[in-house]
Amino acid sequence: MSKGVVYILVIIVGVLIGSIGFILLKKQDLLYRLQLKLDTMKNIFLYIVEWILYLCVIYFFLNFLTVYHYQNIFSLCYLFLLVFSISIFTVYFLILFFKNKDCIQNIFVLIMIPIGLSFLFLMLPDFIPDEPAHFQKAYLTSNFNFTSSIQVFIDSDYVVQEIKNYSEILPSIYFDFGSSNYTEFNNACGYNFILYLLPALGINLGKLLHLSLYGCYYLGRMVNLCVYIFFGYYSIKLVPKMKWIIFAFMFNPMFIHLAASYSSDCMINSVCIFSVAYFTKLYYSEENITNRDIVIVISLIFLIAVVKYAFLPLFGIYFLIIPKLLNIERSQWIFLICCIVLGISFLGLHVFVLAKNGETIESQVSYLIENNVDPGKQIELLLSNPVNTLAMIKNTFIENKDFYFSSFVGQLGWLNIGINIISHRLFYFLLFFSACLEKNTFSILNRIWFLLLSMVLGIIIILGLYLYWTPVGYPISSGVQGRYFAPTVLLILTAVSNGILSKIKYKNEIVFLLAVLVNIFVFKDVFLFFL
């Protein structure tokens, strides 16, 4: 029997035992009494318990994997502890699932916690796109340095891609009460510190607890995952329509594996999704716009302006609520102007102070020089004949369309972890299926507007990388990946959303099952890559 089969059997046995335990609880009426007790607790505490229980599963799995796979020792002790922890987690998961099965946002959190944590430990440190640069920026931010400096001093235990296999994870996490030595690194990315503020808090918490460097590293990753779950929860909760679209969209394996890392895309994608959700909430609400709405929307706009201004056309959807905006009171107009002024001030602080002396990472400088990347000459070329621009955009889509479809869902890590075709096809089916579950009242003109905005976003993304990453005169744009089109795809789903499958039976269960299956099959691909 192969070791891979053993791992699968152990997990299946643990889940089966837990499921049987759940059924026995239900038959003996103990489940009802447990649920009554759980009803008195806030959901946040229930999710914290779930988080801890799943960390126990991961801990015992890593121990069993280490002795069985890397040391060729079959440990009955770790086997028992792993099966036991899986069983306990399964019972708890099923209790919460049936307690919240009609509340989509609660189910989202319930499922995302184990899936997100699985990605967090399956993907080894620094094997996510540009994670070394993002981690170094987060560490710089944890030192309360909010500038765009690329230099940062990090505990000498840190080495880029130091952890090479799963057996090295647990030994790298420990309490360290000794004095630390620091090494200078010069690869911190130049994005605004606000993208890294929360994972930096996780790093600082680890420092306060005297955790080792990689203990701090994993805590920061966990905080970033919490950010993704937080935005997903409130995005689904806020929208009166499109709940299933957002639910399915956020279970994209690409987005989750980025969220379970230090990638800035976690915050950027989350804010984009939340921005569409908040628009939908305002569009369908019969209530007047409040000062709170103004603060939230203006904050979202200027946040994107600072961290990813290419995505600003996304906020064109808010033009549809201008009639509502015109009805706000005079005091609210003054408040709106004050918020805009504060937003402009924050933007100015970023441009003229924090990013004033920003540097470029050496590897990027080398690439730009070696590949003759010159934005000025590229603009001259495009302006010399408008046909050049249209031809470049057309050629880019024709040449790279398959790669964009693939790398929107798969091509994990440094584009070197391909995912199985089942997960790839299932996820696109899940998106299509979720877009057909809820009827909305967007007019034809509204839908055309969404499609136009998605087209503008796509063109800007391609043009941006053509100017700043592509050799002068090259016929197609280089460096564009499918994941960059996240807001574009979300707008397309919004435009085509309908209710033709709204009466289908067991739609909740189908969406939940598909979201889980897509990612479980991806776990296998990632696990085998590092094993």
Image: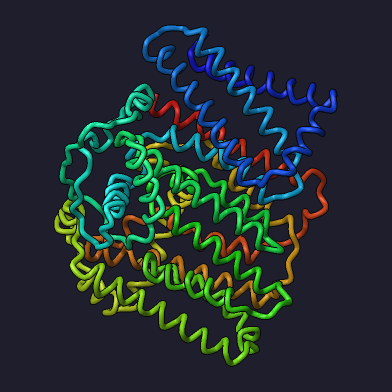
Quadrant in the rendering for residue 364: bottom left
Counting from the top left corner in percent of width and height, residue 249 is at 58, 52
Q: Is residue 27 above or below residue 482?
A: above
Query: Which of the two residues, 439 or 259, is positioned nearer the viewer here?
Result: 259
Question: Is residue 268 at all visible to an observer of this figure?
Answer: yes
Counting from the top left corner in percent of width and height, residue 339 is at 47, 80
Q: Is residue 30 above or below residue 424?
A: above
Residue at image position (30%, 78%) is 385
Residue at image position (39%, 65%) is 308
Counting from the top left corner in percent of width and height, residue 360 is at 20, 59
Residue at image position (47%, 72%) is 301
Quadrant in the rendering for residue 274: bottom right
Q: Is residue 86 above or below residue 78?
A: below
Query: Which of the two residues, 446 or 338, is positioned nearer the viewer here?
Result: 338
Quadrant in the rendering for residue 110: top right
Residue at image position (44%, 37%) is 418
**Left or right of 56 on screen, residue 217:** left
Residue at the farthest bottom position:
330
